[in-house]
Amino acid sequence: MIIAISGLHGTGKSTCAKALAEIFNLRYVSAGEMFREVAREKGFSIEELSKLSEIDKSIDLAIDERTRKEAEIGNVVLEGQLTPWIIANKGFKIYIAASKKDRIERISKRDGLTLEKAEKETLTREFSERKRYK
């Protein structure tokens, strides 16, 4: 079984994916966590790695490839903005949506940021991702 969960930052993708993985006894794999792991390894912030990824396509391509491999193994819930497209015609696909206001509030609480900082960081990341994902 393969389940791919997508949505913008702060919609609850991870919460939903983890719950489904537990309910169905599946592995949980997060593309966002893979990206954060690369940032930590390189000593970069998420924002710095996002900027680098705009010019160095290999970072996103490596995460996409790892996501494909996890889907091939199966018995997994894949969580990430592009996971439904990466797995193509395999598995179940779920898109989670929430208003910008709700997303920013969730991110603010989750990350311990002011609403203003959460909004700025989130919109900056999403702008970078729109450019990269084309």
Image: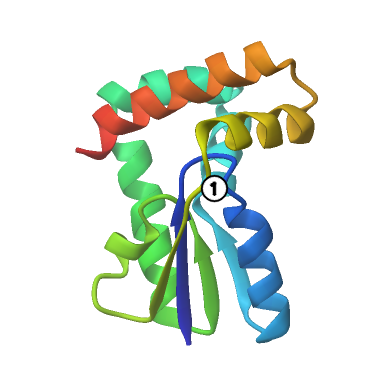
Q: How would you rate the neighbour count of disc 1 (Cα within 10 Å): few for under 14, some for 14-19, many for 20 or more? A: some
In terms of image quadrants, where is residue 22? bottom right
In front here: 51 or 119? 119
Q: Quadrant of the C terminus?
A: top left
- Residue that sits furthest to the left in the current view: 134
Q: Is residue 2 above or below residue 109?
A: below
Residue 6 image position (x, y, % from top left):
44, 56
Q: Secondary structure at mark 1?
A: helix
In front here: 66 or 3? 3
Please state the total of marks drawn on the protein image: 1
Residue 44 in view in this figure: no
Q: Is residue 50 above or below residue 38?
A: above
Q: Is residue 43 above or below residue 26?
A: above
Residue in view at x 72 percent, y 27 percent: 108
Report whether 62 appears left or right of 34: left
Residue type at tag 1? Met
In terms of image quadrants, where is residue 71? bottom left
In terms of image quadrants, where is residue 107? top right
Residue 5 image position (x, y, % from top left):
48, 63
Residue 61 image position (x, y, % from top left):
30, 46
Residue in view at x 57 percent, y 55 percent: 13
Residue 122 in view in this figure: yes
Q: Is residue 109 above or below residue 91?
A: above
Report whether 38 appears left or right of 12: left
Question: Which residue does the numbered mark 1 point to in the structure image?
Answer: 34
Residue in view at x 48 percent, y 50 percent: 97
Residue 121 image position (x, y, % from top left):
55, 18
